[in-house]
Amino acid sequence: MAPPPRRRPRVATLAVVAALVAALPGALQKCVFDEVQARARVVRAAPVPPPAASHPPQTDGRPRAASPQPIRIRTWTPAESDGLSGAEGERLQAAVDEAVRTVSSLLSVNRGPGPLLLSRDVNKYCKFLWKNSSTANYNRCGRANKNYRAETCLDVTIPDDHLAGCDVYPHADSPRRTRLRPDGAGLPRSDFLLYLHVRATDKCRAEPGVLAYAAHCRTDPSGRPLAAVVVICRDKLTGATHGRRATAQTVIHELFHALGFSKELFHTWRDCSSTFQGGARCSPRGRVTHSDGWGQMRVYTPSVISALQSHLASTHPELGGPLENLDVPPGRVSSHWESRVLQGSIMAPVLGDPTTVRIDPVTLAALQDTGWYAVDLSRAQSLVWGEGEGTTFGSLSACNKSSAFFCTGSGFGCHYLHLHKGECQTDPHLEGCRLYKPLKNGSECWKEENGEEEPWSGELFGFHSRCFFSNLTRQNRSGGSVAGRCYRHMCTGPNRYRIQVSGSDWVDCPAGGAIQIKGYRGSVHCPDRRICLYADVTPPADAVGTTPTPTTRQVPL
Ligand SMILES: *[C@@H]1O[C@H](CO)[C@@H](O)[C@H](O)[C@H]1NC(C)=O
Ligand SMILES: *[C@@H]1O[C@H](CO)[C@@H](O)[C@H](O)[C@H]1NC(C)=O
Ligand SMILES: *[C@@H]1O[C@H](CO)[C@@H](O)[C@H](O)[C@H]1NC(C)=O
Ligand SMILES: *[C@@H]1O[C@H](CO)[C@@H](O)[C@H](O)[C@H]1NC(C)=O
Ligand SMILES: [Zn+2]
């Protein structure tokens, strides 16, 4: 008996590469996306089949009850990957597990039946395809390529076990075929395969700021990416330079690129808003990136627009998601948000200190608008940056005056989340706009060990401390200039709090006002709508108790 006819592989094998540059102090912060992209092997996708064939009836004959389930991301370490020492390997694994857990809690997919099998690249295993569209084997392989060896995903060799088989049809019109490769076992209970490649690649060595980069290499018939490589630069992981949270965020950032937030995929996003028979009917969105009136390229899709409108408190109908334009030719796009507008987003071009990086509503809206995922938008973290600031927030003309988010000059102050002291700085992505960035070290108010620097300023460091603009000084000292200072705080309601300065009682700090403290000259400014408003803006949970108090220090371990 002849085996049932196989569906033709019609996988898009376009390799899409995005790279993340770390915010390393002193290192040139440069996104290498375009360079990596230019060097990536790009295989043109096979022609899209007629719609009827892409929705075969389920075997039980009933329409598929589409009920998206959390995406199951399977990580696989390829044979080419460098081994990591025990502790290093465990740290990386913990970070990757955290990233995968996070992404699965956010994105759901319609799970396919059976194990995940990746298609082979017909242009690799095949010497020629039947090109006569009136014949039965149109676009099928007519003759095997004798030199065919293996499939790759970026620079990773895909194990045969992960690959579907392939056939050759010696006659244009006959169903007779010969099996070139058998089906692999596939990956059970998997919706996405992540090849985690730890390596000191040339790309890693060439760019000191590059921590990781990614490329997707297989998609399903709807265009949803099924497999990707994330390359983690071996040398950047060693030692304590990059903590678990920062590594996890790096992997999430790369995963979001590979899952759809990529300039190579924007035009393949689908509109699945109209539903029928319990499933979603999807149509291509076509081009989603356009220039606004000022030459800023934006993503114009419904969820992105509404997320940005609600974030900026604007009803402007053309408020698309702005894309970073540094080093991007006019009219072209990048795969990151414009950092002046969406500073702190997980999809900004540079990730800062892990406590300042947010999985924000606009990024989740973009993933929703790919059409491939059901996204739990309720799990978005507050972005804070720019909230309620209106349509023109982050524009070059508007950032020039000192505001709640931007600063001028080069003084000291507070990072806008008030967890860190900051220095008013710019970077190439900000194009002259300036904001208070965390100091290189000793910046975290919530770290007790950062204290004891300047006792005359009344600073208190610890889990409950936050940054305040202040020029408090002890009576016996001459006046200091206004800078960011760490004081303890206690919430008494939304946007209401008290603060405590070294040696003082708890004092009400009215949001938007300024207070004086007994025993000190000068005053403390009480920020409005920054403190005691966002439950998810906190120091890392594991910072509680990491600093031993004098009593615990005496306990032998
Ligand atoms: C294509 O195939 C059909 C059916 O076999 C045949 O009649 C026709 O001549 C072929 N066309 C070409 C250009 O080979
Ligand atoms: C900001 O304004 C100053 C003068 O007011 C000007 O010199 C500077 O170029 C402006 N910067 C930007 C980014 O517009
Ligand atoms: C920053 O770190 C350097 C080296 O570890 C140290 O010498 C310096 O005092 C630190 N600065 C602050 C502000 O903590
Ligand atoms: C503190 O700053 C305020 C406002 O900038 C200023 O009016 C005051 O004189 C300063 N006080 C001291 C002691 O420097
Ligand atoms: Zn990136």
Image (cartoon, rainbow, N blue to C red):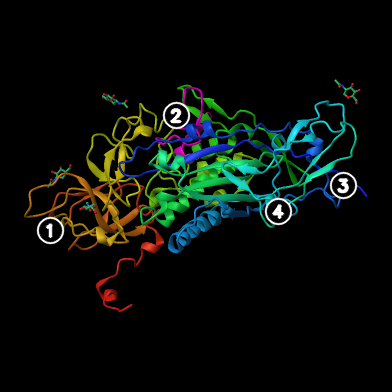
- The kind of residue tagged 3 is Pro
Drawn side of residue 497 relative to residue 370, left or right: left
Label 3, secondary structure: give it.
loop
- The residue that label 3 is drawn on is 4
Note whether residue 202 is visible.
Answer: yes
Task: Kindly identify which residue carries mark 4.
Answer: 186
Which of marks 4 and 3 precedes in the sequence? 3
* Magenta stretch contains residue 325: yes
Type of the residue with mark 4: Gly
The x and y percentages for residue 248 are 47, 53
| Residue hosting label 1 | 519
Tell me which numbered mark, 2 or 1, is placed earlier along the sequence: 2
| Above or below, 431 relative to 534 | above
Verify CB contact (< 8 Å) between mark 2 and mark 3.
no
Counting every numbered tag in the picture gives 4
Mark 3, ligand 1, within 8 Å: the answer is no
According to the picture, the residue beneath numbered tag 2 turns out to be 325
Q: Which residues are magenta?
A: 311-340
| CB within 8 Å, label 2 to label 1 | no
